[in-house]
Image (tube, helix red, strand yellow):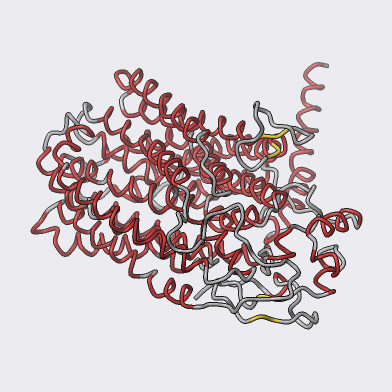
Amino acid sequence: MTVTPSPEARPGTGGSGAEPVPDDGDGDGPAVLPSPRAGARAGTPAGARADAHAGARTGARAGKRPVPARQAGSGQAPPSRGFLARAALLTASLSVAGALLGLVRDQSLARLFGAGRDTDAFLVAWTLPEFAATLLIEDGLAYALVPAFSVALARRARGAPGDPVRSLVAGTLPRLAPAFAAVAVLLAVAAPWLVGVLAPGLPDPALAVDCTRLTASCVLSFGLAGYCSAALRAHRSFLAPAAIYVAYNTGIVVTMFTLGGRWGVRSAAFGVAVGGCLMVAVQIPSLVRRLGARRPARTGTGSGPDTGAGTDAGTAPGQRPVDAALMATVLLFALVRQSQVLVERYLASGLPAGAISHLNYAQKVAQIPMTLSTMLCTVTFPVVARALADGDTEQARDRVERDLVVASWLVLLGTAAVVACAPQIIHLLFQRGAFTAHDTAATAGVMRVYALGLLGQTLTGVLVRSYFSAGRAAWYPVAAMAAGLAVTFWAGAGTVGSWGVTGIAAANAAGITVTAVLLLAGTASGPRGRSVLPGGPRGVPVRARRVLAGVGGPLVAAVVAAVAGALVASRAGGPYAGPVAGGATVTAVFVLLGRVPVARGGASGPPSLPLARVMPFLPSLRRSFVRRLLLPVRTLVRRLVHAVRR
């Protein structure tokens, strides 16, 4: 099943007089040839659509957004907000299911093996899947392959000779798969040295070595899964990529309960290998269908033959289809970003037993709001890459700015809930079996400090996509991430002696916030489009003032909501009443005090928030709350003050 754009997202369909073209298998439904009605809806006469520059001038005179070149030649309409909302909802729903299964996995790990030496050994080996997921699925490989597939799809839509998409697969997959396998074997052989570097003070290094050798297989399985995910998302097919973590965590949980009695914590490591294979298996059928479909070459679009100039993606076999410098920068960025985990575990390895486990559980729960807030960006990243491939920088900029505000609004709401209800959440999720009340208190304290860096984590995840979405190498984000990592290391080394694991979590929050500030400065442009930094914007130019204005209100609301929610949650009795009461309070206060952006017509309006479109009563509810409650309270306070002064 593939989420496809609605009819209103396809100019020229639905009786507009356009001529449909057979589906090319990219998940967008049938492509269409331009029609007078489609041109009128875009603000451009039909005759001007053959010339992108003429169309842009005509659209500007009509008072509407200029028509980008992709509408003239790509044959693919930009996705509507309805399509993006449905795709984001599908991705978020399956991601929530995967995250819940991840909690089940962590609960099972805590229940079966507690928070002691065995789990510390496994969590050192767990570093490999964490790195592999970031490098090969979530960030690194996707940043290189999604733009490459977007360019290949754009060339295919323009009627390029042969099939650029199949040529891209033929030029990349046979090279990447053996490389993934070789790295997996190398890590398995070097497991003793790797454990010694990652956790030199570990009480039981032999167990960690065994687990590391089992988890090393994830490099091959995650690499293939990430390749399939990037290709499918570029085709605007989101179901199978979103389901991979459901399959992954299911494999780990089933393996732990099946083999845990005989293998101990090694069963969890073997479950990583089983889950990785399932991640590939759930995507193969959908990818085969996408690559098997081929739309006949189109003529009469007015765009002329495709020459492939300016890109080497999707070229004929024998040429280099993906820039090696791009691959190096994206993998290096992801490696440096994930190295924060190495720094944390290195610093925590000298602390009492259980410190690494407390860090792990706190991080897993605290990052749920960040993961959910970036789901929209997972869907829109191929949109930004395709817009840049078609030369539409304006659409890419609007999309990135909108994603920044929406993701920030959502993660701040989640941050407030995590800070307010941290002890109750950890108690509800983990306090059973070998996980004691002491573990709950320690993990909750660390989680509250971790949550302070969630906004920086989210902004970093959104902004870095704007650097790599054009399919070109970018070293600036690598330098920004390295600066944040340096802050994390030195701040953690300076505070771990006095603050313990709390100091490590604070250093993590400080380091990622520094990275987010540097990345925003690198893309920021002034009122006249000039870059804030010398040399021009490093990524998609973003109007920083507009973004910061959209984030400032929710930030203040999150602070107030966290305080109110913590007060309510601490007074509610029972393991379930605390999180429910605290979460409801946080949500109510945040929605009433936070600035909910509402979409306006035109590209100059503020970024829209899907929640405001789904629930348009929120702004009016906030005004009613201020008018009926806050204003009378303020008047009463003024009268009391006046009476006292008299």
For image coordinates 57% across by 30% down, the residue present is 517
639 relative to 151, above or below: above
Q: Which of 156 and 66 is in front in this view?
A: 156
Where does the image place residue 31, in percent across and percent down from the top left? 66, 75
Quadrant that contains the C terminus: top right
Where does the image place residue 148, in percent across and percent down from the top left? 52, 56
For image coordinates 46% across by 66% down, the residue present is 167
**Occupied quadrant, residue 202:** top left
235 relative to 405, above or below: below
How many numbered circles are shown? 0
Q: Is residue 602 left or right of residue 583?
A: right
Q: In this view, does 51 lie to the left or right of 483?
A: right
Q: Which of 53 and 596 is in front in this view?
A: 53
**Occupied quadrant, residue 281:** bottom left
Where does the image place residue 189, in percent across and percent down from the top left? 15, 45
427 relative to 312, above or below: above
Q: Nearer the viewer, residue 607 or 334?
A: 334
Where does the image place residue 185, in percent across and percent down from the top left? 19, 51
User: Does residue 242 appear in this view?
Assistant: no
For image coordinates 26% across by 33% down, the residue present is 355
User: Does residue 371 appear in this view?
Assistant: yes
Q: Is residue 254 left or right of residue 389?
A: left
For image coordinates 51% across by 28% down, the residue present is 514
**Occupied quadrant, residue 542:** top right
Q: Which of 563 and 236 is in front in this view?
A: 236
